[in-house]
């Protein structure tokens, strides 16, 4: 991770995105991410499944990545980069043991999605977000966007996945 | 788990289901589960997400449960028992480390869905499957149904979840 190296890029993105905020945020009062102005897309919970993740370490989370039609189509056709309009939403839940499931097995081995930890969004717009690989990012906790400091880390963390258009998640069979 | 205690029930179901097999399997040559005659429903990979699971122990799997419209509607309305026609499909993947993701964090902490281990199906038909809580079961590996011995364990394992209509999975926020 080299967040410092990407700061100029992020600042440039912030300047470029500022003019688009009114459009990107939709209706007044809708919560948008700092820097990118990305909102939680309506109906995302009904989107199709891309894959799932288990994060240990400081997270202890189970995650699911969902995609809108444009994202799913690109995944299935194996096309990169993702087209403008593609959106990926990652639901991050706190990982909790399943008491009912564990009773059946007679030991603690099953863990399920508990409460929501946060929800992250990637929106592809190659012009608007040209300075950050064509992606606009957002992180929400309890429906509210996280602060600017947190959002400055989005692109730098995704940068190692440049060969896959900055997207870590692969489509699960 | 008391599989022995449920054997008479399963056998009764097998007798009752036999006459329905032609209908349940759909087109000739379509693979159906023994005992229940349940097939892999077309388009299930596009269904909406119910929740995700991490199974340790002998499994080492990540799982996602998807539901057809009838199942999702029942979940969201909190209605039990599930209506006839509800179908839940559980995708079980081998859990593998994500090299790309771990490089970012500098340690092994991220695991993703690898190859498919198996896919399980629950179909609600309160009359056809009356002897097994109204549910017909199926387990597929590489697209082929597992054997009868395996399918005799389905209902007995789900029986402890009787208060939730024999379904372990809760809807994730």
Image: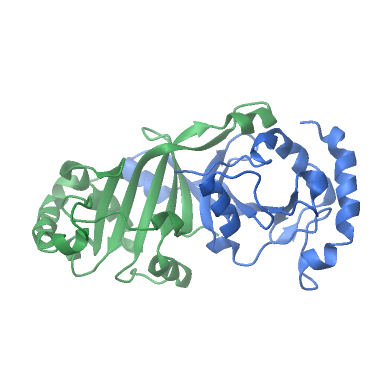
Chain colours: A blue, B green
**For residue B157, above or below residue A157:** below
Coordinates of residue A128 in the picture (x, y in percent):
80, 55
Q: Name the residue nearer the viewer: B32 or A113.
A: B32
Q: Using residue A102 as the reference point, say whether residue A121 is left or right of it.
A: right
Q: Using residue A163 as the reference point, say whether residue B169 is left or right of it.
A: left
Coordinates of residue B51 in the picture (x, y in percent):
48, 54
Question: Which quadrant of the figure contains the N terminus of chain B?
Answer: top left
Coordinates of residue B60 in the picture (x, y in percent):
42, 34
Question: Which quadrant of the figure contains the C terminus of chain B?
Answer: bottom right
Is residue A68 visible from the viewing direction of this image? Answer: no
The image quadrant that residue B160 belongs to is bottom left
Q: Name the residue nearer the viewer: A173 or A79.
A: A79
**For residue B159, above or below residue A31:** above
| Residue at the image position 70 percent from the left and 36 percent from the top | A162
**Count of picture labels:** 0
Q: Name the residue nearer the viewer: B43 or B86.
A: B43
Coordinates of residue A59 in the picture (x, y in percent):
63, 40
Is residue A89 visible from the viewing direction of this image? Answer: yes
| Residue at the image position 48 percent from the left and 48 percent from the top | A112
The image quadrant that residue A21 belongs to is bottom right
Q: Using residue A149 as the reference point, say whether residue B133 is left or right of it.
A: left
């Amino acid at each position: 991770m080299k967040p410092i190296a990407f700061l100029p890029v992020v600042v440039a993105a912030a300047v470029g995105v500022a003019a688009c905020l009114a459009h990107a945020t939709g209706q007044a009062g809708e919560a948008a991410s700092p820097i990118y102005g990305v909102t939680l897309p309506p109906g995302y919970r009904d989107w199709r499944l891309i894959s799932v993740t288990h994060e240990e370490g400081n997270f202890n989370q189970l995650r699911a990545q969902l995609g809108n039609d444009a994202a799913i189509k690109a995944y299935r056709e194996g096309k990169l980069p993702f087209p403008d309009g593609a959106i990926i939403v990652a639901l991050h839940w706190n990982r909790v043991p399943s008491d009912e499931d564990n009773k059946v097995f007679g030991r603690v081995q099953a863990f399920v999605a508990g409460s929501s930890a946060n929800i992250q969004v990637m929106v592809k717009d190659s012009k608007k977000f040209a300075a950050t690989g064509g992606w606009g990012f957002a992180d929400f906790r309890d429906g509210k966007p996280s602060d600017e400091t947190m959002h400055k880390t989005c692109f730098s963390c995704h940068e190692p996945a440049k060969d896959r258009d900055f997207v870590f998640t692969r489509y699960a069979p």
